[in-house]
Image (cartoon, helix red, strand yellow):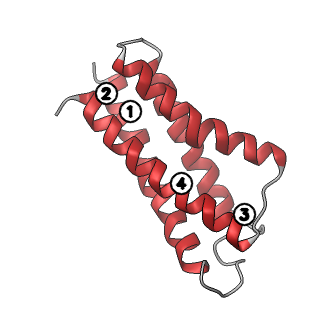
Amino acid sequence: MDRTLALTGVLLAHLAVAAVHGLSHGLLAVGLAPWQNAVVLLAVFLGPVIGVALVRREHPLGLPLFTASMAVGLLFGLAFHFLLENPDHIHALPAGTWRLPFQATAVGLVVTGGAGTGLGGWYWWGR
């Protein structure tokens, strides 16, 4: 499979999961600090998108940017959704309609973040 196609597929899945997760954040009123919002914007959204755009143009920074962004997003999500006690932890949420989507998409971000980090690293170091 063409690496651009594979990276684009992972990116689209990742963005879909991240969008639903962000929506559930808003609907559950689970706010983030300004620095956390900056990390999410840069590592979860902009970095991977710009990375794939650069890979499509065969720019040498595309794979490192994509891979690093996905890795930072993965580590950030693991820390705040599963490891650190905070309002963003999956067990700190109140019961309600959006609790399960929040939890499921938190897991989904681990899956897509891991896939993006692994695939990006495979292509980056495997060439």
**Residue type indicated by callout 1:** Gly
Which residue is denoted by mark 3 in the rendering? 84
Q: Secondary structure under badge 2?
A: helix
Q: CA distance from mark 1 to mark 3?
A: 27 Å
Residue 51 percent across, percent down from the top left:
47, 26
Seen at 62% across and 62% down, the residue is 23
95 versus 9 height, above or below: below
> CB atoms at circles 2 and 1 under 8 Å apart?
yes
Q: Nearer the viewer, residue 89 or 5?
A: 5
Badge 4: few (under 14), some or many (20 or more) residues near its Cα, within 10 Å? Answer: many
Q: CA distance from mark 2 to mark 1?
A: 5 Å
Residue 59 percent across, percent down from the top left:
41, 11
Seen at 70% across and 78% down, the residue is 93
Q: CA distance from mark 3 to mark 2?
A: 32 Å
> CB atoms at circles 4 and 1 under 8 Å apart?
no
Q: Nearer the viewer, mark 4 or mark 1?
A: 4
Which residue is denoted by mark 2 in the rendering? 123
Residue 47 percent across, percent down from the top left:
56, 31
Q: CA distance from mark 4 to mark 3?
A: 20 Å
